[in-house]
Image: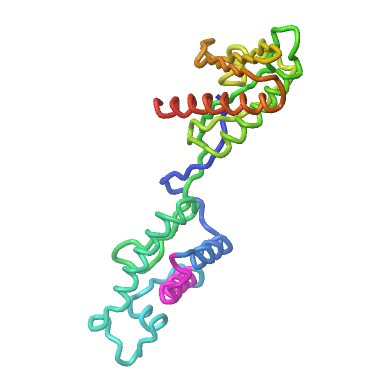
Amino acid sequence: MEIKRMVELSADEVPDPLDREEIERVLASLLASPVFAKSRRMGSLLRFLVEHDLQFSNTSLTEHAIGIAVFRRDPAVYCTGDDPVVRVQVGRLRRKLATHYATNGQQDPVRLSIPAGCYRLAYQRLRLKEVGTHHPVLQVQPFTCITGDGEDFARGLCEELSCRLFESFEQTQTGANHVLMKVPRSSVKTAEIGRGGRYSYCLEGSVRVEPARVRASLRLVDVAQGRIRWSAQFDRNQPYGIATQEDLAASICLSLTGYFARDAIDE
């Protein structure tokens, strides 16, 4: 199996502190996100909380101060007991942050939250770790002509089939079972893809031609186990040429991609 690397976010908090530039980038990204872009009040509240942290990191932040600075309450008459605007809007901000990180912000490496009972932001840098995803790798071997004529036809059929398989697998990805193609090369020998090689499957084929009849025999070998996983014969009662190559390649591709689709479901 071939391993591709991808990034996964861990829920563990990393103690590395955030610098001013990183915090400002996080804020800008949040304000541009779909959750905050159309909510001016939520954006203003979030910006105020971040800027307060940057300027007065050791100073506590009160509900009264937020009401005056963000919601333009009159200091002479503003009473937090009678006017719950800050508590209500901070609760909304908590929910919007949670919504962002559950949707568009799932891959954000830094997350902001407002712990219950306070009005200061908490910053969490998520640990990035690499995980492997495994994809079957299919090597198409050059087809062999086992009759006196038809070597050019066999090479053309192999080329046509390789193109169709590549297009099919690219358009119908199946998660962890998405198949990666290796194009055929005449210099690649079966011994090079034996047990422990770089390929998951090897597609081998032979062609027999007559003036008005063609037969293609194919088999799919599981390289690691040395077992035949799929085999089929395809007959056409027509002269061998480009049209026959296209017709055979279409049928073979349909049958083989169907096998991989069923295999993905079984797993």
The outermost residue toward the bottom is: 76
Quadrant of the image occupied by residue 119: bottom left
Q: Nearer the viewer, residue 88 or 115?
A: 88
x then y, percent, for residue 46? 44, 70
Q: Nearer the viewer, residue 13 or 146?
A: 146
Q: Quadrant of the C terminus?
A: top left
At 35% from the left and 64% from the top, the residue drawn is 94
Residue 176 part of the magenta-drawn span = no
Residue stretch rendered in magenta on the structure: 35-53
Question: Does 191 sit left or right of 113 as displayed?
Answer: right
Residue 198 is at least partly visible in this image: yes
Quadrant of the image occupied by residue 249: top right
Question: Does 141 sit left or right of 114 as displayed?
Answer: right
Q: Is residue 117 above or below residue 224?
A: below
Residue 223 is at least partly visible in this image: no
x then y, percent, for residue 141? 66, 18
At 50% from the left and 35% from the top, the residue drawn is 131
x then y, percent, for residue 78? 30, 87
Residue 51 part of the magenta-drawn span = yes
Q: Main secondary structure of the magenta part?
A: helix
Q: Is residue 28 above or below residue 221?
A: below
Q: Quadrant of the N terminus?
A: top right
